[in-house]
Image: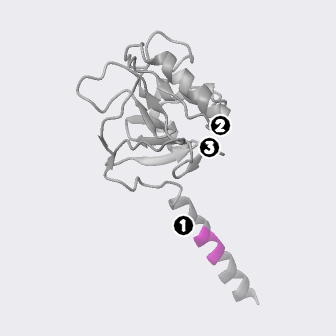
Amino acid sequence: MKLYGLTLLGTCMAVLALSSCSSQLKVKERYLVHQFDYGKTAYIGPEGKATAPPRAPRRVKRMIAAANSLTDKPYRYGGGHRSFSDTGYDCSGATSYVLHAGGVLRRPLVSQNFFDYGKKGYGDWVTVYVRKGHVFLVIAGLRFDTGGTWNSTGPRWKPQRRGTKGYYVRHPRGL
């Protein structure tokens, strides 16, 4: 009986140790490519602002509106870290601002902290892509990013293809 209890305890500890190893999910695709899906995907108008799909949840619409308010802001390293309101934003500051507007983040995070944000895996409406040193969002099928193109100047909606090597995916609960 004593041996059985020790074996059971050892098995439980091994399961817990292995489950903590799977707290991240690597990106499945080699490249992130924008694909429009009517009714599910946001689209970018000529002025660079996104329009949410009519059936998107209210929190998603608030996130898209918040992201739109940043598209005229410049890139600034460390921007958006001390406060959600700033004159310029880096990747994690912009991501934090948008998630906060949707009611799914309480305080600004640096990119590394997004490895522990929300739940692992792809979201139905919002997915956070994170790797060492960078983070960006896909909201309603549209990428919001400060990088990924040679002429990036700040947080913008970007339909262009982006490599995803080294990225992991997370999402806010329920989205």
Residue type, numbered disc 2: Pro
Q: Nearer the viewer, residue 139 or 154?
A: 139
Which of disc 3 and disc 1 is earlier in sequence? 1
State the extent of the magenta-drawn residues as a range.
Answer: 11-15
Q: CA distance from mark 3 to mark 2?
A: 8 Å
| Residue under label 3 | 175
| Residue at the image position 43 percent from the left and 13 percent from the top | 88
Left of 131 or right of it: where is 124? Answer: right
| Residue under label 2 | 57
| Residue under label 1 | 18
Q: Nearer the viewer, residue 168 or 137?
A: 137
| Residue at the image position 49 percent from the left and 20 percent from the top | 68
Residue type, numbered disc 1: Leu
Q: Nearer the viewer, mark 3 or mark 2?
A: 2
Q: In the image, is residue 38 part of the stretch drawn in magenta?
A: no
Are the residues at dot 3 and dot 2 in contact (C-beta closer than 8 Å)? yes
User: Is there any visible trace of residue 120 in the rendered image?
Assistant: yes
Q: CA distance from mark 2 to mark 1?
A: 35 Å
